[in-house]
Amino acid sequence: MAATAKTRHRSADRPTKKPKLGQNFLVDIGAAQRIVDALGDISRCTVVEIGPGRGAITGLLASKAEKLIAVELDRTLAAQLRMAYLRKAHVEILEADILHIDCDSLVQGRSKQITTAPQEMPHKVARVVGNLPYYITSDILLKLFECHKNFDRIVIMVQKEVADRIAAESGTSDYGVLSATAQLFADVENLFTLPPEAFSPPPKVHSSVLRLRIAPKAAVLGVDEKGFIAFLRSLFAQKRKTLSNNLKPHFESAQITSAIRATGLKADVRAEAVPLEQMAALYKSLYKK
Ligand code: SAM
């Protein structure tokens, strides 16, 4: 049946469907090039691409990287990419959920050896890149931090507001658990921002590209990663509350007061004002480490 003017109008008004699996494909080729450039020299590197999609970044990576492993959850897209790179032995397309991938075997099982300490097992280091599916940005980041020993550099596109939070410094309103956790593992640079028109379909938000140079700080700060990350979560549990109030479900008031004083912080300080070093000092004071 031919669409009447009325039905045509209605379908044009219908809100655009939320893209499946965060599929907003990059169509700005210049931006794709800048993302690949941000990885540095990858001619002797294994690169892991998260969510290659229709391959906007993949093609550029394939022409530069020594080895490329692209992990795509969408069965159809993964099959199309596999066909496209059939003759490129150095490109591997995995149809898988990045959150369920074992990073150690992905990288240690396949990538080129870059560093070898004399008495140690050879340890291989790869680089990660991706225009991330925004619905799981935090989960992907936490996963990458968990297995950070496999990587030396991560270049990712995320929603601008999330990028601002990841890169935020203490003392700013954007500083939160994501910033503190990211900075525990890496030096973060906010590289550039793209408007919605750089993607198809255009998302409702702007997007930013971040570069994270892996530089773990837990050992220098004298904290254990797992326990300290859990502690950071409790410090930021409710952003409007003081740090002391956020700690109350976990410690006696007297303990909190004396640890805050010993760390040189004000009694009514909020977590967003506290740099990582002082958070570590507070952690060690509370847990007598
Ligand atoms: N890299 C492409 C580009 O820049 O045009 C696509 C980026 S799009 C924002 C995100 C991609 O991640 C989509 O291809 C989507 O299918 C894929 N994806 C979504 N969830 C995923 C997951 N859990 N594991 C791996 N890939 C996923």
Image: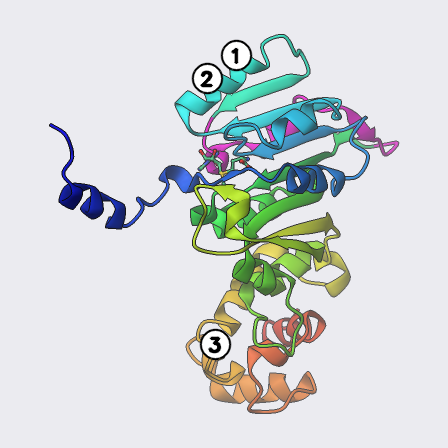
Total residue callouts: 3
Residue 149 left/right relative to 137: right
Q: CA distance from mark 3 to mark 2?
A: 44 Å
Residue ID for mark 3: 239
Q: Is residue 221 magenta?
A: no
Residue visible at 26% across and 46% down in the picture: 12
State the CA–CA distance, disc 1 to disc 2: 6 Å
- Can you identify the residue that label 2 sits on? 79
Q: Nearer the viewer, residue 86 or 73?
A: 86
Q: Where is mark 1, residue-wise? A: 83
Quick check: 227 above or below 271? above
Residue at the image position 63 percent from the left and 8 percent from the top: 87
Q: Residue furthest right?
A: 118
Query: Foreground: 29 or 91?
Result: 29
Name which of mark 1 and mark 3 comes first in the sequence: 1
Q: Locate residue 57: give its quadrant.
A: top right
The answer to whether the residue labelled 1 contacts the one labelled 2, judged by CB atoms less than 8 Å apart, is yes
Tell which tag, 3 or 2, sits nearer the viewer.
Answer: 2
113 in magenta: yes
Pinpoint residue 48: horizontal percent, then vertical percent: 63, 31
Secondary structure at badge 1 equals helix
The residue range painted magenta reads: 96-119
